[in-house]
Image: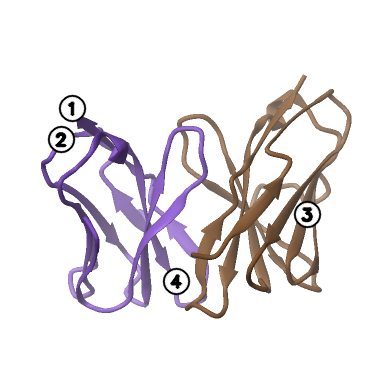
Chain colours: A brown, B purple
Amino acid sequence: GAVVSQHPSWVICKSGTSVKIECRSLDFQATTMFWYRQFPKQSLMLMATSNEGSKATYEQGVEKDKFLINHASLTLSTLTVTSAHPEDSSFYICSARDPLYRYEQYFGPGTRLTVT
Amino acid sequence: QKEVEQNSGPLSVPEGAIASLNCTYSDRGSQSFFWYRQYSGKSPELIMSIYSNGDKEDGRFTAQLNKASQYVSLLIRDSQPSDSATYLCAVRRSQGNLIFGKGTKLSVKP
């Protein structure tokens, strides 16, 4: 299957600071990437859909000014958590669709964010 | 009615048995169906995709799709303790976004 990488795999930051998470499709070009959040023992929650060269589409209830998404190239999308608070601590996972194989969707390894 | 429904489990099977995981969906326009495996603390991994009615086999895994009944299942033969994980059913709407079920937790006992 296609490979999606994510960096960093974990990060600890202080309340009020910003954190950037990178998501890369390594062996395919992804016009569409997705950002999910998952709290312990809970389901995946789609935060936003990121389209290359255009603004991201956010799901209801997700603050677009707090979770900044940039999809500047066909292989890179970034999620910036601005002015992080302890309640933003979660597992953030990106995902990308492979257009050359029926748009099957592959996940990155995830980033565990802890805000102190 | 939830869009994609799965029994949350836990489903417990002995090692070597067949594990049967089920999923129903509400959108008749759905065209693509996927099973992901998620180990605790890890991200989901795509293990099976199925697009047409019938069975699709890949090693110990068999996905079954019945569009008339809006039902998709995953069978795991010769279950191993390493198969213990949460299995997520996902359905693609005609518009393209994946809709996930809440997952079924599978425990394979040695």
Discs 4/2, front: 2
Q: For the residues marked 3 and 4, what is the alpha-carbon distance in whole angstroms?
A: 25 Å
Q: Of the residues shown, which amino acid type is indicated by label 4?
A: Arg
**Residue occupied by mark 2:** B15
Discs 3/2, front: 2
User: Marks 1 and 2: same chain?
Assistant: yes
Percent from the top left, x then y, of residue B73?
22, 58
Q: Earlier in the sequence, mark 4 or mark 2?
A: 2
Q: Residues within 10 Å of mark 3 (few under 14, many from 20)?
A: many
The residue positioned 47% from the left and 48% from the top of the image is B44
Q: Of the residues shown, which amino acid type is indicated by label 1?
A: Pro
Given the image, what chain letter belongs to the residue carrying mark 1?
Answer: B
**Residue occupied by mark 3:** A78
Discs 3/4, front: 3
Residue B63 image-quadrant placement: bottom left
Q: Residue B76 versus residue A83: which sits nearer the camera? A: B76
Percent from the top left, x then y, of residue B89?
35, 55
**Residue occupied by mark 1:** B110
User: Marks 3 and 4: same chain?
Assistant: no
